[in-house]
Amino acid sequence: HRDLHSFPTRRSSDLQDEPKDEEDAGGGAIRSIHELRLAGENSRFHGNLDSIFEDLEAAGRTGRSRRLRGLMQLSEKFLEPTFCQRFVENGMHQRLANHAFNETDVLSSMLISCALSILLSSCKPSLKMLQQVFDAVMHSSAPLLKETQELSKFVRAIAKDRKQNLSGATC
């Protein structure tokens, strides 16, 4: 025969650690689900940005078309205020502004200038951000303001392209 006192018993402190009802037990799980969703949203946001910046920083044979596509995607996304806010909160405006200083292609410079201008108009920039982005806009706009032979040829080629549906008077 075993003594009844030899069986392990629960202490009152063990009982206090357990939830008293299902609502208490579910509270932590619900919070965890919200945290997981937020982490998933952040991961998708950063994944999308990484993909766009991979396009912006592309080199090689398809680099120019990838940069142009990435800049157009970014410009479209800047029309969403929540995207702009998250973009700025993560300091990505600095990365884009730095990219503007390294761009040599005229069309890419124009799109960077447009994207940065849309960003500035879609969010409430701090003074520091305004200066960083404004400097990048001015730098990327400079080639557009100069009358260069390359730009003139580009405009003429676009105007003559029937697919663009522009009049000859545009030249």
Image (cartoon, helix red, strand yellow):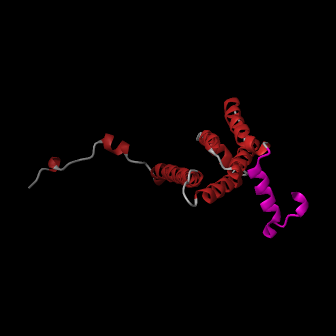
- The residue at 70%/34% (across/down) is 135
Q: Which residue ends up furthest to the left in the rendered image?
A: 1
The percent position of residue 102, horizontal first and vertical second, equals 61, 42
The percent position of residue 105, horizontal first and vertical second, equals 66, 50
Q: Which residue ends up furthest to the right in the rendered image?
A: 169
> What secondary structure prevails in the magenta region?
helix
Q: Nearer the viewer, residue 13 or 84?
A: 84
Residue 2 in the image: above or below residue 136: below
Which quarter of the rendering shows the N terminus?
Answer: bottom left
- The residue at 63%/45% (across/down) is 103
The percent position of residue 14, horizontal first and vertical second, equals 31, 43
Residue 150 in the image: above or below residue 95: below
The tally of labels here is 0
Residue 77 in the image: above or below residue 163: above
- The residue at 20%/48% (across/down) is 8
The percent position of residue 16, horizontal first and vertical second, equals 37, 42
Q: Is residue 124 visible?
A: no
- The residue at 70%/49% (across/down) is 106
Q: Is residue 142 visible?
A: yes
Q: Nearer the viewer, residue 70 or 149?
A: 149
Q: Is residue 47 magenta?
A: no
Which quarter of the rendering shows the C terminus?
Answer: bottom right
Q: Is residue 130 left or right of residue 165?
A: left
Q: Is residue 169 magenta?
A: yes
Which picture quadrant has residue 99?
A: top right
Q: Which residue ends up furthest to the front in the rendered image?
A: 149
Numbered range of the magenta stretch: 147-171
Q: Which residue ends up furthest to the bottom in the rendered image?
A: 162
